[in-house]
Image (spheres, grey):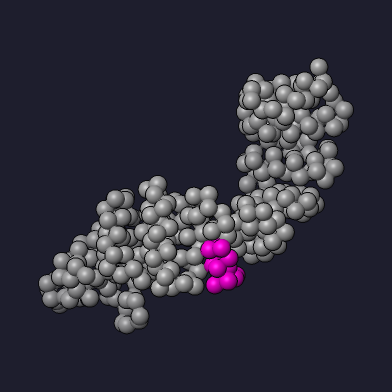
Amino acid sequence: MNPAARWLVAVALLAGCAGPQGGGRPAPAKPAPDRQPDSYSADELERIGKAYNAQGESAKAVEVLRESIALDEGRAGAHAQLGLALSRQGKAEQAREALVRAHRLDPTHVEAALLLGMAHDLAGDPEKACKVYQETLAHHPQHAALLHELGNTLLMLGRSAEAHKALAGARRASPADPDVLGDYGYACLVTGHAAEARKVLAEAHNRAPDRADIALNLGRACLADKQPACAIEAFEAACELKSQDPEGWVLLALARLRGGRLGPARQAAERAVAMQGSHVRARFLLGVVLDAQGERKQARRAFQKVIELDPAFQPARDWLRKHR
């Protein structure tokens, strides 16, 4: 899941936390009509702001939460909710500033850490995001969402082994979550654990059969584990879910080719080329299939087109040199 999508998930998570941490009576949806605004305590104003956030009334939430903070600047929850409300208004930098204050005041505040970490990711600062997650994980070492987001950010940074460890922890903490399973399976794949990746991604796909990204990664894991039949099934599912994505058809062509199904492989490659004529790997795979079918002239044209699109594509150059 990309940072923007993860941010939306976190926003939904925190928006649902209308009640105060640790329980207590629910926040009123709006101030009671028989009380003056200045008669509310900082705690009451924070709960009212949370309620406005839960109802999507961001402007009212900002106003009330700023009143709460004016009465008590040390309220981490109010700063976190203010960050949420500001983010919904498109004020990303102001939102991040509010979340930074929330995290400094209370590094144990999970929701604030999640939002701040993802805000750092969106701002192109994943190292800061990692630091935030790790600081809060020191207080909640088995928190599934924190481990999950830390693992995703480490994957973005190319720190695959660390990501694998974090996501394995997230899986232990939340073994039925298809998002966690999907990301852990991908981490297994990129760290060379193909068999484990195939197993975990198959479970994720069973739990979320409408997720094309999980189906694609399952197919990749099957290919890496030398299981072309499994890969074909996964890529076919992905193509049904996202039929206009040429990448899925390219991968399906590759799986069918490895499974010895030349006719269907050609159909998939031709479909990918029809969708995106500049897709180099689609053109190359089409050439490979045509060559395997004995259609040398058509294969040559396909490989020549590959070179036109990418002069540095060495496999196509090698074939053309071999078949001068």
**Residue 126 in view of the camera:** yes
- As drawn, the residue found furthest toward the bottom would be 24
Residue 196 image position (x, y, % from top left): 69, 61
For the stretch drawn in magenta, the main secondary structure is: helix
Q: Quick one: 165 or 33, which is closer to the camera? A: 165
Q: Quick one: 265 or 54, which is closer to the camera? A: 265
The structure residue drawn at horizontal position 60% and vertical position 63%, both measured from the top left corner, is: 181
Magenta span has 177? yes
Q: Quick one: 177 or 154, which is closer to the camera? A: 154
Per the rendered image, the range of residues in magenta is 165-179
The structure residue drawn at horizontal position 41% and vertical position 53%, both measured from the top left corner, is: 127
Residue 282 image position (x, y, % from top left): 69, 33
**Residue 48 in view of the camera:** no
- As drawn, the residue found furthest toward the top would be 324
Residue 279 location, quadrant: top right
Residue 6 image position (x, y, % from top left): 46, 56
Q: Quadrant of the C terminus?
A: top right
Residue 198 image position (x, y, % from top left): 70, 58
The structure residue drawn at horizontal position 27% and vertical position 73%, both measured from the top left corner, is: 47
Magenta span has 103? no
Above or below, 161 relative to 28: above
Q: Is residue 25 left or right of residue 33?
A: right
The structure residue drawn at horizontal position 70% and vertical position 43%, both measured from the top left corner, is: 251
